[in-house]
Image (spheres, helix red, strand yellow):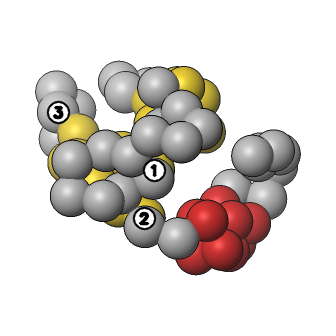
């Protein structure tokens, strides 16, 4: 598994978990994106996005994180 930081926030970072080549995560997913949004000054709200297709992952990363260069 490869881990990439997509965006650094104050409390927590948005992270991309990418399965190794030829492997998948449980449930048939190739990638997971954990995003954190501000909830209170002590906590962030966690949202997990799961991707089964490489095209959908590239489209999402391209629109949400244009400064991140995804090279699969």
Q: Earlier in the sequence, mark 3 or mark 1?
A: 1
Q: Which residue is mark 1?
A: 31
| Image-quadrant location for residue 12 | top left
Q: Which residue is mark 3?
A: 43
CA distance separating discs 3 and 2: 26 Å
Of the pair 53 and 50, the residue shown nearer to us: 53
Badge 2: how crowded within 10 Å, few (<14), some, or many (20+)?
some
Is residue 4 toward the left or the right of residue 9 in the image? right
Q: Earlier in the sequence, mark 3 or mark 2?
A: 3
The image's mark for residue 51 is: 2
Badge 3: how crowded within 10 Å, few (<14), some, or many (20+)?
few
The image's mark for residue 4 is: none
Is residue 40 in view?
Answer: yes
Mark 3 secondary-structure assignment: loop
Mark 1 secondary-structure assignment: strand
Which residue is at 43% across, 64% downward?
A: 51
Which residue is at 45% across, 40% downward?
A: 23
């Amino acid at each position: 598994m490869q881990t990439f930081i997509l965006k650094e926030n104050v409390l927590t970072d948005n992270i991309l978990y990418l399965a190794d080549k030829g492997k998948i995560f449980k449930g048939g997913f190739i990638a997971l994106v954990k995003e954190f949004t501000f909830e209170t000054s002590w906590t962030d709200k966690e949202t997990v996005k799961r991707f089964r297709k490489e095209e959908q992952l590239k489209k999402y990363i391209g629109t949400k994180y244009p400064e991140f260069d995804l090279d699969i």
